[in-house]
């Protein structure tokens, strides 16, 4: 147990005793008076008094001795409701819940402000990396132009294994779950929603703008195959799930999550396994880089406990809720290079017909690899384009998909620019 928590006050309720809840409990045992779980009969390999465990939230909300609630259940229901009720009952709240803070952060932060309590959520983004607190306080003198990063540990773990061990997604997902990295419903990780919630949280703080979830373009990793890593590597790239929020030339904010080709020479390409990394550009500070464990029990507990220390030290309230400085723009306006892997008929003229469709939208091809002739007479064709507008690329893809000689567009990955 850390010295800083050896206060005798039993004033904390812990909601959830799973991967993160357990690690937090180990550090603050003597301060916890209640632990809420779903199944009180579950065998738990941890020593604690039976008296403190409950499945009835009413016991916690009605207990006036509890002034700090740590929510580590996850998901929207019932966590959102429990957080809201705790704030309304004038209890300080710490949460690691990116879904609730991504969807309802604006409302809950306003409510916390009104009730003069803390609502702190450092653990909701990038696990053990302190990122929210620096954005809220240490870097608040800056105007930010971009945030980009790898902010989902599960998918980064999976993509790293796919790249290094030539495994497919399904084979590695179970490992990430066993290590406690994945959400209870791992589609949240795989389909990019977890990163979507997190980039919404970071955008709200950095850009003074509430970005609702449906304003964020999202695409997960389920279409990425190990073969994409081989081709990407030949072209000098690797594949990462990247979340970005950036101000474009029209001074609008574009927020998106999708797999991206990252050049092998930039540091983001070497952020592997469960590590997360966030790169921030501020007008005063320049480029900052944060890297560390993005998931896992102890790393996440570190962030939860840092929030607890803030409350115990009764720092000035930092429920900074930002409003609407920027207009959010859509993915259509995104401009980048593209990697495409197509399964095509191995006949002369295929490339010319594809190039013609691209040409109609002013998209130029920068390189082509033709690989892997399959038994059925089809072949893999890998195309890299010059930078193009997303709107034009989407139209071209539809037209290319209609060509008789193109059997399928197996993957389309955007290339991240580091110019
Ligand atoms: P977890 O292992 O699935 O644990 C969830 C806990 O919540 C369990 O103890 C479960 O009770 C309890 N619970 C579930 N539904 C409940 C309900 N309806 N009422 C009361 N209790 C309920 O989850 P976790 O991995 O610790 O994640 C917790 C939170 O931290 C999530 O918001 C997650 O996104 C976030 N987070 C996780 C990580 C990580 O690496 N795991 C990292 C950063 C943030 P039982 O034990 O009885 O089933
Ligand atoms: N499932 C999340 C991840 C947990 O893999 O990043 C940390 O937020």
Image (spheres, rainbow, N blue to C red):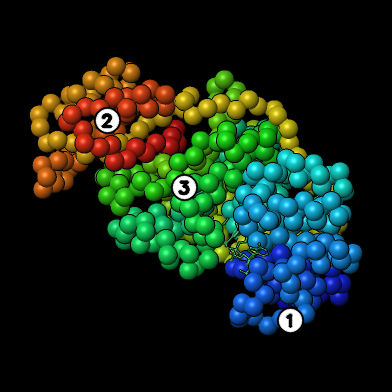
Does mark 3 have its CB less than 8 Å from ligand 2?
no
Question: For this rendering, which residue is in front, 119 or 384?
Answer: 119
User: Residue 54 location in percent, x, y?
Assistant: 74, 72
Q: Kindly report the distance in space between the C-alpha atoms of the residues bearing marks 1 and 3.
A: 38 Å
Question: Compared with residue 264, is residue 90 higher up or lower down, i.e. above or below?
Answer: below
- Secondary element under disc 1, as helix, strand or loop, is helix
Q: Earlier in the sequence, mark 1 or mark 2?
A: 1
Q: Kindly report the distance in space between the C-alpha atoms of the residues bearing marks 3 and 2.
A: 23 Å
Question: Compared with residue 186, is residue 384 higher up or lower down, i.e. above or below?
Answer: above
Residue placed under numbered mark 1 in the picture: 50
Q: Is label 3 in contact with label 2 (beta carbons under 8 Å)?
A: no
Residue plotted at (74% across, 56% down): 82
Question: Compared with residue 350, is residue 27 higher up or lower down, i.e. above or below?
Answer: below
Residue 191: numbered disc: 3
Residue plotted at (59% across, 68% down): 19
Near mark 3 (Cα within 10 A), the count class, few <14, some 14-19 or many ≥20, is: some
Which numbered mark, 1 or 3, is in the foreground of this view? 1
Residue 169: numbered disc: none
Residue 339 in which image quadrant: top left
Residue plotted at (31% across, 50% down): 225
Question: Compared with residue 204, is residue 41 higher up or lower down, i.e. above or below?
Answer: below
Residue 21 in which image quadrant: bottom right
Residue placed under numbered mark 2 in the picture: 401
Question: For this rendering, which residue is in front, 36 or 48?
Answer: 36
Ligand 1 positioned in quadrant: bottom right
User: Residue 317 location in percent, x, y?
Assistant: 83, 48
User: Residue 261 location in percent, x, y?
Assistant: 38, 41
Residue plotted at (86% across, 43% down): 114
User: Residue 219 location in percent, x, y?
Assistant: 45, 41
Quadrant placement of the C terminus: top left
- Secondary element under disc 2, as helix, strand or loop, is helix
- Secondary element under disc 3, as helix, strand or loop, is loop
């Amino acid at each position: 147990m850390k010295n800083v928590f050896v206060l005798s006050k039993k004033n904390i309720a812990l909601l959830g005793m799973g991967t993160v809840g357990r690690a937090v409990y180990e550090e603050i045992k003597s301060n916890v008076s209640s632990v809420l779980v779903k199944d009180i009969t579950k065998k738990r390999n941890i020593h604690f008094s039976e008296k403190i465990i409950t499945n009835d939230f009413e016991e916690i909300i009605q207990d006036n001795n509890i002034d700090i609630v740590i929510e580590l259940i996850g998901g929207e229901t019932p966590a959102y409701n429990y957080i809201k009720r705790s704030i309304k009952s004038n209890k300080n709240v710490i949460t690691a819940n990116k879904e609730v803070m991504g969807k309802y952060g604006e409302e809950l932060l306003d409510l916390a402000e009104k009730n003069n309590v803390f609502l702190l959520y450092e653990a909701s983004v990038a696990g053990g990396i302190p990122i929210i607190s620096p954005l809220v306080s240490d870097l608040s003198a800056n105007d930010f132009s971009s945030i980009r990063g790898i902010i989902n540990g599960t998918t980064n773990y999976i993509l790293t294994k796919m790249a290094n061990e030539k495994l497919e997604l399904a084979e590695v997902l179970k490992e990430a779950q066993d290590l406690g990295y994945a959400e209870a419903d791992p589609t949240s990780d795989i389909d990019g929603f977890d990163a979507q919630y997190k980039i919404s949280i970071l955008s709200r703080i950095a850009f003074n703008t509430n970005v609702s979830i449906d304003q964020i373009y999202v695409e997960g990793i389920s279409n990425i195959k190990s073969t994409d890593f081989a081709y990407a590597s030949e072209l000098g790239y690797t594949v990462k799930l990247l979340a970005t929020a950036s101000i474009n030339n029209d001074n609008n904010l574009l927020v998106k999550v999708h797999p991206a080709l990252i050049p092998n020479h930039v540091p983001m390409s070497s952020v592997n396994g469960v590590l997360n990394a966030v790169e921030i550009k501020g007008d005063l500070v320049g480029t900052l880089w944060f890297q560390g464990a993005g998931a896992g029990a102890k790393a996440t507990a570190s962030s939860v406990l840092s929030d607890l220390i803030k409350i115990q030290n009764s720092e000035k309230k930092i429920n900074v809720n930002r409003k609407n400085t920027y207009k959010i723009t859509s993915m259509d306006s995104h401009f980048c290079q593209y990697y495409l892997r197509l399964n095509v008929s191995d006949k002369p003229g295929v490339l010319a017909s594809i190039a013609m469709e691209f040409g109609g939208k002013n998209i130029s091809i920068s390189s082509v690899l033709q690989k892997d002739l399959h038994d059925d007479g089809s072949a893999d064709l890998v195309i890299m384009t010059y930078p193009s507008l997303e709107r034009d690329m989407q139209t071209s893809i539809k037209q290319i998909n209609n060509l008789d000689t193109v059997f399928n567009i197996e993957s389309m990955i955007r290339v991240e620019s580091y110019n």
